[in-house]
Image: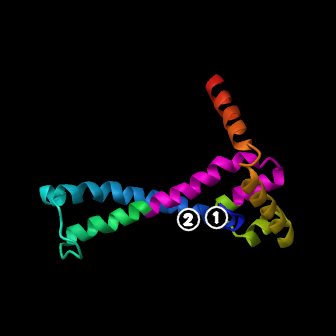
Amino acid sequence: MNKKQIENALRDYAWMINEIKRQRELLNDVGDNIVAQSGIDSAMPKAQGNTSDPVAMEVIRREKSTKWVEKLEEKVLFIQERILVITDEREKAVLECMLDGMSMVAIGRHMGFSRSHIYQLRDSIVDKIAHSEHFGHIKQLRKKVTNKSCCV
């Protein structure tokens, strides 16, 4: 991910988490019913083009939703795997507020910092996340977390 994509993923993190949750519930609940309702006909080859079968159309729509949710999950996992590279206390606080869905103005008010200072902290967070792969931080931090959790 480039820096702009990371910045967008941080900004959108809260709604992406909520949407993943919502979509999983929908796909799990209704997905079972659709497969059961469509029966053996759903496994049979279909002619190319559009279908007039509403159940088949719903299956197609849900398949597209599944792919979209997978893309959201990739973005969320990208951020989650790199949270540990943020070690500065102020940056951690800004990051947590961003992940909770707070606006930059609200974070500034909450922390008592100017808007420009909050944006500087955000830019530093984005830089660290963007460069985390280059320095091998992620693998080292994962090992530390894994070792701590297995030995506790």
Q: Give coordinates of residue 79: x percent, y percent.
A: 64, 54
Q: Which element carries disc 2, helix, strand or loop?
A: helix
**Does 61 sit left or right of 34 as displayed?**
right
**Does 67 sit left or right of 113 as displayed?**
left
Residue 114 visible in the displayed image: no
Depth order, front residue of 8/96: 8
For disc 1, the marked residue is 101
For disc 2, the marked residue is 15
Farthest top residue in view: 151
What residue span does the magenta drawing correspond to? 68-97
Q: Residue at x 33, y 64 (%)?
A: 62
Q: CA distance from mark 2 to mark 1?
A: 7 Å
Depth order, front residue of 113/56: 56
Q: Residue at x 42, y 61 (%)?
A: 67
Q: Give coordinates of residue 87: x percent, y percent.
A: 80, 47
Q: Which element carries disc 1, helix, strand or loop?
A: loop
Depth order, front residue of 121/105: 121
Asked whether the beta carbons under mark 2 and mark 1 sit within 8 Å of each other, the answer is yes
Farthest front residue in view: 48
**Dividing the picture into quarters, in which one does residue 34 lie?**
bottom left
Q: Mark 2 Cα within 10 Å, few/some/many (few <14, many 20+)? A: some
Q: How many marks do you count on the picture?
A: 2
**Does 96 sit left or right of 45 as displayed?**
right
Q: Residue at x 81, y 68 (%)?
A: 119
Residue 79 part of the magenta-drawn span: yes
Residue 91 visible in the displayed image: yes
Q: Quadrant of the N terminus?
A: bottom right
Q: Quadrant of the C terminus?
A: top right
Depth order, front residue of 134/132: 134
Amino acid type of the residue that numbered disc 1 sits on in the rendered structure: Gly
